[in-house]
Amino acid sequence: MNFEQLKSLDQQSHTPNYGRYDLGLSHGKSSTVYDVEEKQYIDFTSGIGVNSLGFADDGWAEAVYHQAKTLQHTSNLYYNEATATLTSTLTKLTGMDKVFMCNSGAEANECAIKLCRKYSFDKYGSDRYEIITLINSFHGRTMSTLTATGQDAMHPDCFAPFVGGFKYAVSGDFEDFKAKVTDKTCAVIMEMIQGEGGVLPQDKEFVKQVCEFAKQKDILVVVDEVQTGIGRTGKLLAYEHYDITPDVITLAKGLGGGLPIGACLCTEELQNVLSAGSHGSTFGGNPVACAGASYVLSKVANQEFLDEVAKKGEYIFSRLNKMKNVKSTRGLGMMIGIEVEGMTGAEVAKKCIENGLIVLTAKALVRLLPPLNITYDEIDKGLAIFENVIKGE
Ligand SMILES: Cc1ncc(COP(=O)(O)O)c(C=O)c1O
């Protein structure tokens, strides 16, 4: 099937809710991917932070294949080893006590919202349900995570009415945060680096102040690590850069390495909140997705690997910061935002595709989320294309 045939087939039947590039991908290896006409591209996107180990990693594919051939799904009515192994590894690696498994970042955040509200309800009664999120945040596209998302543009009238009980505080402004807290507040949800909001790292002092204040008032701190987690910033979880202890952590994207997965982790104090029947998901903890995730963790949750991510990130930042027309860069590890002089992120992304590189955007920025195991050779090839594109060549 050539590209025009593929595009036409897709457009006849697929809902038109994605703004897509004129590019049809066919197969890939590591951080190199090919379109349906065999043109090669360097991948600086990892499928928006999902393919932690790049395309078609042999060990990951083997783990997934083995599980698919053995026991692909059981329902949550029964126990299975692949799921139990993953939840156990996640608790060991994070120091959290329990994990709810689901299928996406939005679902992980939905779980966090329900968990926080139920914790508060069980302890304080019915009138303590408000959740504070930050302006510019992104937490998902379901009705409650969309409401939690602190961006007016994500709350158009066509989807009204939105879910009640959310308030939005200004990032970095502790006074504003305190002003939003009332005796109805049960939780705060934050990303340590706002990805979709424009690769905006939180101020360390602000995060610490919020967490200390929340602790005093028994307001639960939820850290949304859906985009920042699983090694992306050079630590297993981005909150480790911030010297805080969250009550709840949400994960998705890079955890699965390419299969749908989400996880909501909580501390010992919250271990019994999600009592039997209070929450669930048919596919949550799917053995195949969990086998893939366990493989991802076996590679990523390792100091040498994480140091290498940090080093590659520093290398990319240092190369970018020397490029003519790079106005500014921000981010951490291999979560990188770039402001380009005279070009929007969308313009850069389009031109990169023409030249054999795929990149992401976030607001007006170019955003890079390369696979965590990208090689220096692939980084150099990708950066050479990027430099030419922003030079206007
Ligand atoms: C920080 C954050 N939270 C939640 C989500 C939603 O994840 P999903 O698209 O898997 O539902 C995203 C997706 O980009 C995200 O970046």
Image (spheres, rainbow, N blue to C red):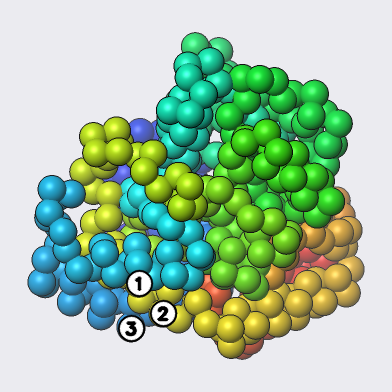
Q: Which mark is residue 294?
A: 1
In this figure, which residue is indicated by the disc labeled 2? 298
Q: Residue at x 79, y 59 (%)?
A: 330
Between the C-alphas of marks 3 and 1, the distance is: 14 Å
Q: Nearer the viewer, residue 203 or 265?
A: 265
Cβ of mark 1 under 8 Å from ligand 1: the answer is no
The quarter of the image holding the N terminus is bottom left
Q: In the picture provided, is 179 more to the left or to the right than 119?
A: right
Say if 225 sits above or below 321 in the image.
above
Amino acid type for the residue under numbered disc 1: Ser
- Residue 43 in view: no
- Residue 358 rendering spot, x and y as whole percentages: 57, 63
Q: Are the residues flagged by discs 2 and 1 in contact, CB closer than 8 Å?
A: yes
- Residue 88 rendering spot, x and y as whole percentages: 35, 67
Q: Residue at x 52, y 82 (%)?
A: 302
Between the C-alphas of marks 2 and 1, the distance is: 6 Å
